[in-house]
Image (cartoon, rainbow, N blue to C red):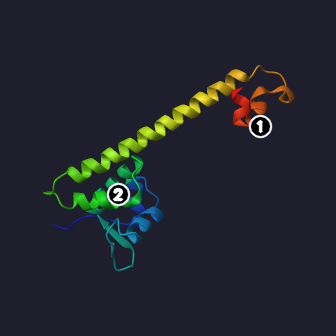
């Protein structure tokens, strides 16, 4: 049975990934080097497509390219313990939680700024005044 292959453009459309990104992942070693057809076009397999989808999903979860490389390495060794994967995901979860806490602080600060605004003109705008002042002065 002949395995179906995809050009970079077709793979890009199937995975909603820019062709330049696919080539970059190939250059970085995250995707294996694609074979070439007689016209010189890259030819990707269904396994390449699945690997690219894995990369996209891990990137969407906020993993760095180095993390993705490690996770791909783990996935290539199916019988190994998943303790390393668990640790990697736990670390990423803590980073996400930390960013959420930071964003909640920003949200509170923006809400505080919004409560300063009483309408009117920019010359009297409490938001602009608050943003222009030092944090120590705003706390008093």
Which residue does the image show at 72% across and 30% down from the upper left?
138
Residue 112 horizontal side relative to residue 132, left or right: left
Q: What is the crowding at mark 2: few (fewer than 14 residues within 10 Å), some, or many (at least 20)?
A: some
Viewer-nearest residue: 3 or 62: 62
Which residue does the image show at 52% across and 32% down from the upper left?
104
Screen quadrant of the N terminus: bottom left
Secondary-structure class at tag 1 = helix
Viewer-nearest residue: 25 or 68: 68
Q: What is the crowding at mark 1: few (fewer than 14 residues within 10 Å), some, or many (at least 20)?
A: few
One can see residue 46 in this view: no
Provide residue 6's location: percent of width, then percent of height: 33, 64
Secondary-structure class at tag 2 = helix
One can see residue 37 in this view: yes
Q: Is residue 35 above or below residue 92?
A: below
Provide residue 72's location: percent of width, then percent of height: 28, 59
Which residue does the image show at 38% across and 53% down from the upper left?
56
Where residue 69 is drawn, which disc sits there?
A: none
Residue 14 horizontal side relative to residue 81, left or right: right
Screen quadrant of the C terminus: top right
Q: Which residue is mark 2?
A: 68
Q: Nearer the viewer, mark 1 or mark 2?
A: 1
The quadrant holding residue 126 is: top right
Viewer-nearest residue: 92 or 36: 92
The quadrant holding residue 55 is: bottom left
Residue 24 horizontal side relative to residue 108, left or right: left
Provide residue 80's location: percent of width, then percent of height: 15, 57
Q: Residue furthest top?
A: 118
Of labels 1 and 2, earlier in sequence is 2
Which residue does the image show at 39% across and 79% down from the upper left?
40
Q: How far, Cα to Cα, is label 1 from label 2?
A: 42 Å
Q: Which residue is mark 1?
A: 132
């Amino acid at each position: 049975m002949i395995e179906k292959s995809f050009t970079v453009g077709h793979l890009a459309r199937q995975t909603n990934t820019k062709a330049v990104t696919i080539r970059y992942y190939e250059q970085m070693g995250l995707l294996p080097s694609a074979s070439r057809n007689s016209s010189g076009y890259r030819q990707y397999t269904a396994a390449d497509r699945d690997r690219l989808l894995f990369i996209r999903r891990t990137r969407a979860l906020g993993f760095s390219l180095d993390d993705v490389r490690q996770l791909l390495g783990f996935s290539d060794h199916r019988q190994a313990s998943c303790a390393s994967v668990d640790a990697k995901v736990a670390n990423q979860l803590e980073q996400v939680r930390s960013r959420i806490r930071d964003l909640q602080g920003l949200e509170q600060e923006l809400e505080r700024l919004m409560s300063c605004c009483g309408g009117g003109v920019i010359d009297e705008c409490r938001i602009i005044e608050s943003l222009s002042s030092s944090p120590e002065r705003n706390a008093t």
